[in-house]
Image: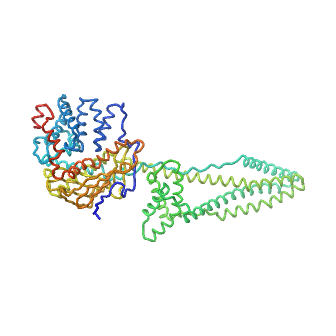
């Protein structure tokens, strides 16, 4: 079996995907009729984030509209050469840049002219082969003399154009900037926020309103009329007899009946609430309600289990006690949360903040000694009140009835039948309706209590994410890391830039990495797998490492060396939805594999071409293919092959007719 070196990235081990939109959408392509300034701003955002291909496409249109703008010409040149060497230009691009540089050189002097002049001189120097001497006298001084922002932009975007002894002179300054830039902007405290999704606002399932039918309302009305009529009849009869004690007993009986009914409602409400909890507990323990694997409910369930273990602390015994006490209450919260967010599209990551808060709050209550799965008990006093008040009502009514019968038996009997009818309806329909109202009242109070806590936590979490880094900051930090890795590789192999004929780098998602991107932006990862290829006269030097992006720290270094004739082939496999794998095959049978771009469907606001170009620019795939495909096809002869031949042809044609510039670059 052939050995296989699999460099994990892309889908492998990725545990969370986030796409930021809304206020985080830095790369929304403006319409064709958008103001010029807006389209220029968008192009510069793409350029600053390392997406030179898309920036180049946008600036191509802008330079046609404003050919005399020094700012547009400056950034067009940066985008044109951004991330690539002079050797990578096609014949058409070669002709165009020659004409544009000549035209730009004839423009009147403006505030951008000095920067443009430095770029033209760098372009001329970049046309030479790496092993050829280049007259770069004064370029370093002129570059350092530019405004800091302008000079930094030239160094960043034209890095691959600068080579040889000139790069040796400029490199230490670049490394100092990279060391300062890799920790700028409070990186370690902010990077993790880029991978946090925009939280969904808190939701709690609404409490169903009590539905009372017209028939029930009519029956309750009849009950009220019956009670009032019968009580009035009995009262009038005992008053006619002059039986004052019976009047007092009647009033007491009515009060006892009301008290018995109210306490009976409370008793039944509590009993039903406990019955519901018991049924839920049995369902949870039997796992009949377990979420279907792979769905939203299952993802939510996994998060609850994760935080249940994360917040467990102490001895094994204490951890077991916490898990046992919290499991059933957390399952109830899980079911409520799934129901609350099921109606609208949601991902588990966007409610993770709420799950974390619920588990943390439950942990605090458990530590305080509160019962997490408390029973809804029916107090003894409530039971006694119901039984005693109901028991006193019946003899009191008998007392009043025997007095009323002596006055008028027919009317008293009618009143008795009316009270019996009212009691039957009140004990069935009325009791059921009042219990449902109690459930609704208790549910509404619980809902408001939960929402109050959830809203406070939601506002706190939003404030915590308020300084989430922009995609451009993420790109700049990664670029600093890449430069420092290049420097490490050069020092590891004890080389100078003048010893390096070409170089390339790949940045792919690392194992167990979180990933996130903005609309029309490339994926950014919490861990990277980074490879550097240094091509020297003796062969290829490869350095591979893992980058923990939040820390800006490299781990697990691997050094590999091989001759040019050891490279058998370079292959790029494009799978479903533009998932791209890079393969470098050696004649020994070793396959160096890197999954460099992610699969995934473009969002509604994404431009598919922008995503593809951005991925190739962000990972370094485009330039790596140019370098290694040439080596695989021609080996050491690549230095005198077609790529360099194009540059050689260009050395015969001047970039400008300006005598002053010609003197400087020639």
Given residues 278 and 345, the one toward you in this image is 345
> How many marks are shown on the rendered structure?
0
Residue 636, percent from left and from top: 16, 52
In the image, is 560 to the left or to the right of 348?
left
Looking at the image, the residue that sits furthest to the bottom is 317
Residue 309, percent from left and from top: 44, 64
Q: Quadrant of residue 555?
A: bottom left
In which quadrant will I find the N terminus?
bottom left
In which quadrant will I find the C terminus?
top left
Residue drawn at x 16%, y 44% as measured from the top left: 644
Given residues 537 and 78, the one toward you in this image is 537
Report the colour scheme. Answer: rainbow
Q: Is residue 389 above or below residue 659?
A: below
Residue 152, percent from left and from top: 22, 43
Q: Quadrant of residue 55?
A: top left
In the image, is 233 to the left or to the right of 607?
right
In the image, is 548 to the left or to the right of 100?
right
Given residues 397 and 649, the one toward you in this image is 649
Residue drawn at x 80%, y 61% as measured from the top left: 395
Residue 336, percent from left and from top: 54, 55
Q: Is residue 572 above or below residue 81?
A: below
């Amino acid at each position: 079996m052939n050995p296989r070196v699999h460099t994990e990235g892309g889908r492998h081990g990725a545990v969370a995907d986030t796409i930021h939109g809304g206020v985080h959408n830095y790369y929304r392509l403006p319409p064709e009729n958008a103001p010029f300034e807006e389209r220029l701003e968008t192009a510069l955002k793409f350029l600053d984030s390392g997406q030179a291909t898309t920036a180049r496409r946008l600036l191509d249109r802008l330079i046609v509209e404003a050919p005399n703008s020094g700012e547009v010409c400056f950034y067009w040149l940066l985008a044109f050469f951004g991330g690539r060497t002079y050797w990578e230009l096609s014949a058409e691009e070669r002709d165009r840049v020659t004409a544009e540089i000549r035209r730009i050189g004839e423009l009147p002097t403006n505030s951008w002219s000095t920067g443009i002049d430095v770029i033209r001189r760098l372009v001329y120097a970049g046309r030479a082969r790496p092993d050829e001497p280049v007259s770069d006298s004064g370029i370093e001084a002129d570059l350092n003399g530019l405004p800091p922002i302008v000079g930094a932009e030239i160094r960043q975007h034209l890095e691959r154009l600068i080579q040889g002894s000139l790069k040796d002179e400029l490199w230490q300054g670049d490394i100092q900037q990279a060391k300062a830039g890799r920790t700028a902007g409070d990186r370690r405290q902010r990077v993790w926020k880029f991978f946090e999704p925009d939280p969904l606002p808190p939701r709690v399932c609404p409490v169903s309103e009590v539905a009372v039918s017209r028939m029930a309302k009519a029956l309750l009305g009849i009950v009220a009329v019956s009670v009032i009529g019968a009580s009035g009849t009995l009262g009038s009869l005992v008053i006619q007899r002059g039986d004052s004690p019976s009047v007092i007993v009647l009033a007491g009986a009515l009060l006892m009946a009301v008290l018995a009914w109210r306490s009976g409602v409370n008793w039944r409400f509590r009993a039903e609430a406990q019955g519901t909890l018991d049924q839920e507990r049995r369902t949870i323990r039997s796992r009949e309600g377990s979420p279907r694997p792979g769905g939203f409910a299952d993802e939510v369930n996994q998060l609850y289990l994760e935080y249940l273990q994360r917040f467990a602390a102490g001895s094994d015994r204490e951890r077991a006690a916490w898990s046992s006490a919290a499991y059933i209450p957390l399952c109830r919260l899980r079911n409520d949360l799934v129901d609350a967010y099921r109606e609208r599209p949601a991902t588990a990551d966007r409610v993770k903040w709420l799950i974390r808060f619920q588990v943390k709050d439950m942990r605090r209550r458990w530590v305080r000694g509160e019962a997490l799965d408390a029973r809804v008990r029916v107090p003894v006093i409530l039971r006694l009140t119901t039984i005693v008040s109901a028991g006193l009502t019946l003899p009191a009514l008998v007392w009043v009835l025997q007095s009323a019968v002596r006055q008028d038996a027919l009317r008293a009997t009618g009143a008795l039948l009316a009270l019996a009818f009212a009691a039957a309806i009140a004990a069935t329909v009325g009791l059921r309706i009042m219990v449902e109202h109690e459930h609704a009242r208790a549910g509404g109070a619980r809902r408001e209590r939960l929402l109050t806590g959830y809203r406070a936590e939601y506002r706190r979490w939003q404030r915590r994410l308020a300084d989430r880094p922009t995609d451009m900051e993420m790109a700049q930090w990664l670029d600093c890391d890449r430069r420092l890795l290049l420097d490490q590789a050069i020092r590891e192999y004890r080389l100078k830039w003048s010893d390096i004929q070409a170089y390339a780098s790949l940045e792919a998602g690392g194992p167990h990495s979180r990933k996130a991107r903005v609309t029309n932006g490339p994926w950014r990862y919490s861990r990277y797998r980074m490879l550097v290829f240094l091509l020297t006269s003796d062969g290829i030097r490869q350095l591979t490492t893992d980058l923990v992006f939040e820390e800006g720290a490299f781990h697990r270094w691997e050094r590999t060396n091989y001759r040019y004739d050891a490279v058998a082939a370079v292959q790029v496999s494009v799978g479903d939805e533009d998932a791209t794998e890079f393969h470098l095959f050696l004649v020994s049978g070793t396959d160096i594999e890197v999954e460099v771009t992610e699969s995934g469907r473009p969002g509604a606001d994404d431009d598919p071409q922008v995503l593809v170009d951005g991925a190739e620019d962000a990972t370094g795939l485009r330039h790596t293919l140019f370098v290694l495909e040439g080596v695989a096809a021609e080996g050491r002869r690549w230095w005198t092959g077609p790529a360099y031949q194009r540059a050689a042809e260009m050395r015969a044609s001047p970039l400008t007719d300006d005598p002053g510039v010609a003197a400087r670059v020639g």
